[in-house]
Amino acid sequence: MRNKNRKGLYLILVVALASLFIASIYFLYTPIDLTNYKNLMLPRVEEAIHARVELEGLVLTILPYPRLILKGLTIKEDRQTVFTAQSVKASLFIMPLVREKRFDIKNLVIEKPVIFGIREADGRVNIVRILKETFVPVTIRKVRIKTGKAHFVDEFLRGGARYEAADIDATFIPKGAADFSYSGTAKLLPSARIKFSGETRNGATDFEGKADIKELAIDQGWPYLRAVVPGERWTGDIDISLNYQASGESLSMQGAAVYRQLTASIPALFDKPISSSHGILNIEVISHPDTLTISVPKAEVYFPDFTIFANLRFDSSQDKNDKLVLNLHTTPIPLISIKGQFFTSILPDSLKQEINATSFRRGQLTISNFKIAGDIKNIRRPDYYKTSGSLLAAIEVRDAEFAHKDLSRVFSMVDGTVQWKDGNLSLQGIHGKYGNSVVEKLEGGIDGLLDAPFVRLNGYGSVAAEEAADELKKWMDKQDMKGFSADGIVPLSFSLSGAWGRQGGEAGKGVALSVSADATSAEIGYSSWVKKEKGFNMAVHADLLAKRDALSIERARIAFGIASALDMKGLLDFHGEPVYQLNIKASDMLLDDIDAIIPYLEKEFASTGRLSADVDIEKTEKAKAPKFKGTVTLRDGDFETRLLPKKVSGLNLTSRLDGNSAAVTIENMKIGNSVFSGNIDIPDLAAANVNFDFTSPYLDDEDIYPVRSLVKASNGVYPHDREKEEIKIPFTPTPKVLVWGFTGKGRVSAKTAAVMGFHVQSLQSDVLLKSDAVLLKAVFISHNGKAVGNFIYSKDSKDAFLWRLNLDASKMELEPLLKQLGAKDKILTGNGDIKLELTAGRGKEMLAKRLDGKIAIDSKNGKLWKFIVLSKVFSIVNIISIDELFKNGLPYKNLAGDFTVRDGVISTDNLLLDSNSMRMSAIGIIDTTDMTIDAKLGLHPFVTVDKIITKIPLAGWIIGGKEKSAISMYYTIKGRLHDPAVEAIPIQALGEGVWGIFKRILRLPVDAVEPLVK
């Protein structure tokens, strides 16, 4: 029984224990909701982490292992949310919890957490601070984050930065109380993929690791990049692989980056945004609380047409200026893209403007070495680049072709090397073309370009003269250069050296320029003053000293011809109103050399003589015209000039210049057969007003102005002299030749002279040169008679007349006068008075057709011989007694007539010869344009009919009067002036008008003749 009861008790105990075990198992596997007890637990946690904790639910399970689940966890610091999680699952070791009341977490899984990280203005990170200050008796063996997010704000960075990450999957394995290792992946919105790993030390104050970032948008890193490189914005994407280490607030990173489609706007270096298809960079970053260093030991930047290889270092400090060091070199860069991809912004404004005004067409540029170093804020200051180590650039140019907006022609085939170092510019092996001009070699440089430039250049080449003339016309006064022309190739060499600007507080001495040019193969002309032909020797050498506002001509020589040279020195000051001082000196220049470059001298004739000069020229700021001082002399000058129709020989003259005046003494001058001496006084050179006085033992106007050559040709017909038209017989007179471009007055005196072919004595002529006319007033003796005349030549095209001539001659011997007019035999003697008024009009017709005026002739007590007309008259009627008289000259008492000139036609109605033997009168015209005559001649002899032997019928003459004398006979004269036809006509053919004139002139008996006329 007792055994039976004992067995029952064992069964009950087993059942009870089994039930208890089963119940325990059930309860241990069943989650226990401790949410209602959270308020008992959270204050201790908040006290430990110094942050507020909010919790939506708390669940504990015992088996199969202790696990604590927190739902809706939120951690806040100063009311700012630092951390949230959908759930936190902690797997615990039970024994430390039971024995030591310490949490030993085997695995912590945080699902869908959101971290709100802030790097504050003082550099501290809120999350790190919370973890560092946390003291909870807890040990975590492993932390896993699933599908997390993170928000990070950097207030420490200047300008701030904000980032957001998603899809964070990470594993953290704690090491000790506060350190841990970590690894994971994340997505930095919007598209970057991040893989990271690492570990912390020293209570999470130090950490190291590595990260791989793919497709990071570069502009996301711009808040940090702008501290490295000045600029506005960078775009593109980049892959980064780096290792990093941090200790406290210090950070270092090393890695490599590959970018794609980079666009960077950096005004400090580039005028325009630059674009690079891809590139590779090695990066090193070292950050301390007060300093930041970013290095790019190696960079390869690929542009569409070239590649840049570079390295860079950036240093930033709170108490010092940010510094940058950049080194680079390139593959050949097409010049056509140079302005978009070159460091033009760092250049001085003047040089940058020149580059911007240049358009590149072909060729390439290679930067073989480029280094820029200095403070970021100084890089854009041009004067910074004069300091040592600031900028080094070596640029090689090959086959360049470019144009400048201010130049007419293109630079081409340009090669050479340009180097910049410490504010000094050097040129090596520069050669190329500008248009057809060639620079074969240019070397040297400019030291101290940004401060006190010192130039040292030398080179040689050749200049296309025509193109150089075009450029001079563009840059100099167009009016002054209007007549300048050139052609051909001019070899030259040059060198420059010297300071420009200020050095050491004192004005620089300037730049010495030495130029040598051989213009032999060039043709050079200036208006109508200079004409140097190709092949004529000419060389120029000049030593100049150029300052900022002045040009000093230390020595200049123009050597030309066989042995002639012109030396010059002086100073040109451009500080305000241009002023200058020049000295021009020449000794014994050969006139034949001058002949070759002065078109006023005829090259066909070998000129002789020597010209010397020593003249100072000065123009002050307030003076309107320059002043001259010195002398010009010409000795034994023989030459021909297109200004004069005859050769000039034996010319000796001295010109003395003083201020604005000149005095010219002509000791001797012979023009053709005319001999001169005299003085020319020019009171005002600028006004070109002259006073002169010439004396001559003999003067021929044909030597000065060939009127006779213009008035008649060899066949006796007037040439068609058109105003300003060249007539080569043998000289071309123009108004410019007549007045020489001067105004003024003077006197010409000649002991003997030939004027219009007439020999005169004691000629005195007052001359008045006006801007629009030339006036002559002459007095002379000719053929024992006295003549007074006035002549006016008009330059004013508005005047209807070209010239006017008035002449009043008295008691001139007619026989020698007619001989000078061309009469071979005796025609007429006597003392004649002549009054002449002629006007030549303007126009293109021959001169004879433009002549108008009147002439009056009155001669007394002379003799008349037969000439062609009278010979023909007396071959028709022979009056024996009169014919006998003609053999020794028919004496006459008076020969007079008035003539009118109209359009070159000379007409008269009162020409009368009155003698004791007969009266003779002529009415009609002579047309000088074609040299013809149309006249009627009346003859009234004082003889009886029986003395007349006639070949004409009785009707041709009339018998009347007490002495039965022949009353009159009439003839027509027509045809060429040198051989007219002469015919007798009856009195009825005269008509009443002509008869009336003859009746009055010949004083015929009206009652005897009148019925016959009717």
Image (spheres, rainbow, N blue to C red):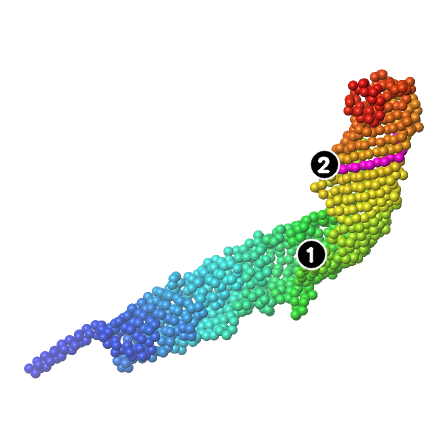
Q: CA distance from mark 2 to mark 1?
A: 55 Å
Name which quarter of the figure residue 625 lies in.
bottom right
Start-end of magenta stretch: 827-845
Q: Position of residue 63 (x, y in %)?
A: 23, 73
282 left or right of 193 in image: right
Tell me the kind of residue under disc 2: Lys
Q: Position of residue 407 (x, y in %)?
A: 62, 53
Q: Which mark is residue 844?
A: 2
Name which quarter of the figure residue 130 lies in.
bottom left
Q: What residue sits right under mark 1 in the picture?
A: 460
Tell me the kind of residue under disc 1: Tyr
Name which quarter of the figure residue 250 lies in.
bottom left
In the displayed image of the protein, which residue is found farthest to the bottom?
Answer: 2
Q: 787 or 978, which lies in front?
A: 787
668 left or right of 232 in image: right
Image vertical order of residue 1014 relative to residue 819, above or below: above
Identify the residue at horizontal 28%, vertical 81% (top origin): 101
Q: Secondary structure at mark 2?
A: loop
Q: Position of residue 642 (x, y in %)?
A: 78, 44
Identify the residue at horizontal 88%, vertical 25% (top origin): 918
